[in-house]
């Protein structure tokens, strides 16, 4: 393993990074090995990665010295942030600046940055179709990532900009699955009207990233969008009906209603869904399914993902 190229994986115990570490370590004949970065190397998830043969190192995205040290000697890095931990675009930008400066200082040959669009290029702040949030953003968790792209470019870091899609795993972890009414009837609420939403299994993001690394320099300097399927809310509800063996009705929630829901970030997500809705042709076109499967031939469709994970999706009952 000493002659293999090291990929430093930020957020290795998370959904995206964990998928990449597993993809690298399962390819025993591949040219890469994984260095898993985590704040807590003693966590259960970190120990699972170590058991796969990954090098697990302590690093904190809010401590630049630890990131630079963790990048030392690596060929490349996968960089990702978790906006929902702090809800701060400024913090997001500072973390990405840390990645870019460390990658430049350590001479990395290929960085994949898990990013999203800066929606202000489509919806200026004076466009009142959706509210402006935090003073200068439309979709803060998108916009900050898109704004941060320039930090890698300005630092001269060879970078692939990987644009992800809606995680189907949100149905498991963020309460977005079906809900039962007082009569036990299941409904699936999504503010997408009749428009298609690109989606993907979180683990497949990491597998696609591995496909990009395996392609060498081919994707450096490029923006690559990925999705497993483009589905309407009604199509997702139909797949849920099939998985559960009972009807699941699609409930197209109005954007303004979703923005007013009582959970942190509801306004951000409401704006996100409206952006996806209003710019469906662009958003789906930027995430081609055939291109995704070229990177990861085993990319799952929604039905396949549901079959494996339906028992993990909480279904709230009235």
Image (cartoon, rainbow, N blue to C red):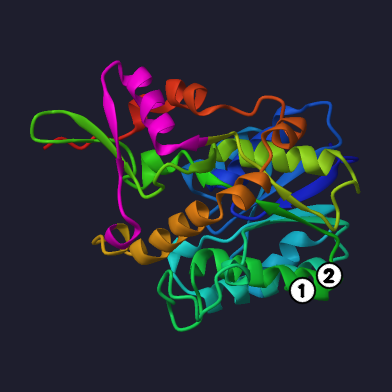
Farthest residue toward the left?
A: 182
Answer with the quarter of the image where residue 146 lies: bottom right
Q: Which residues are magenta?
A: 231-257
Is 153 contained in the magenta span? no
Q: Nearer the viewer, residue 210 or 119?
A: 119
Q: Nearer the viewer, residue 281 or 311?
A: 281
- Residue 16: which numbered mark, if any? none
Which quarter of the rendering shows the N terminus?
A: top right
Picture coordinates of residue 145, whole percent (x, y): 61, 66
Is 184 drawn above or below residue 163 in the view shown? above
Q: Residue at x 44, y 55 (%)?
A: 273
Picture coordinates of residue 48, whole percent (x, y): 55, 37
Kindly state the secondary structure of the residue where label 2 is placed: helix
Picture coordinates of residue 118, whole percent (x, y): 61, 67
Q: Nearer the viewer, residue 224 or 130?
A: 130
- Residue 101: which numbered mark, if any? 1
Mark 1 vs mark 2, CA separation in Å? 5 Å
Indicate left or right for 1 with 271 as reference.
right
Query: Is any atom of residue 125 visible in this view?
Result: yes
Farthest residue toward the bottom?
A: 135
Q: Residue at x 48, y 23 (%)?
A: 303
Q: Residue at x 71, y 68 (%)?
A: 149
Indicate left or right for 193 with 289 as reference.
left
Q: Which residue bears the numbered disc 2?
A: 104
Which quarter of the rendering shows the C terminus?
A: top left
Q: How many marks?
A: 2
Answer yes or no: do the residues labelled 1 and 2 have beta carbons within 8 Å?
A: yes
Kindly state the secondary structure of the residue where label 1 is placed: helix
């Amino acid at each position: 393993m000493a002659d293999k190229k090291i990929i430093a994986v930020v957020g290795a115990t998370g959904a995206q990074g964990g998928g990449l570490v597993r993809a690298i370590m399962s390819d025993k004949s591949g040219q890469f090995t994984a260095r898993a970065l985590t704040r807590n190397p003693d966590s259960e998830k970190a120990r699972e990665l170590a058991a796969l043969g990954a090098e697990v190192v302590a690093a904190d995205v809010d401590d630049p010295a630890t990131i630079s040290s963790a990048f030392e000697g690596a060929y490349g890095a996968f960089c990702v942030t978790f906006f929902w931990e702090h809800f701060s675009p400024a913090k997001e930008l500072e973390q990405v600046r840390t990645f870019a400066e460390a990658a430049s200082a350590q001479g990395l040959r290929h960085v994949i940055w898990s990013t999203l669009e800066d929606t202000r290029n489509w919806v200026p702040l004076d466009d009142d179709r959706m509210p402006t949030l935090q003073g200068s953003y439309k979709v803060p968790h998108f916009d900050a990532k898109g704004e941060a792209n320039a930090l890698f470019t300005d630092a001269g870091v060879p970078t692939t900009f990987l644009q992800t899609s809606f995680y189907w795993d949100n149905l498991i972890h963020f309460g977005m699955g079906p809900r039962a009414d007082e009569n036990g009837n299941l409904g699936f609420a999504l503010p997408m009207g009749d428009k298609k939403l690109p989606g993907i299994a979180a683990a497949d993001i990491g597998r696609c990233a591995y496909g990009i690394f395996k392609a060498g320099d081919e994707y450096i300097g490029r923006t690559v969008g990925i999705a497993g399927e483009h589905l309407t809310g009604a199509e997702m509800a139909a797949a849920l009906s099939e998985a559960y063996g009972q009807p699941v009705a699609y409930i197209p929630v109005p954007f303004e209603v979703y923005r007013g829901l009582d959970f942190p970030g509801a306004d951000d997500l409401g704006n996100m869904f409206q952006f996806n809705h209003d710019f469906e042709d662009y958003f789906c076109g930027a995430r081609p399914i055939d291109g995704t499967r070229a990177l990861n031939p085993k990319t799952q469709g929604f039905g396949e993902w549901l079959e494996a994970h339906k028992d993990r999706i909480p279904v709230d009952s009235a």
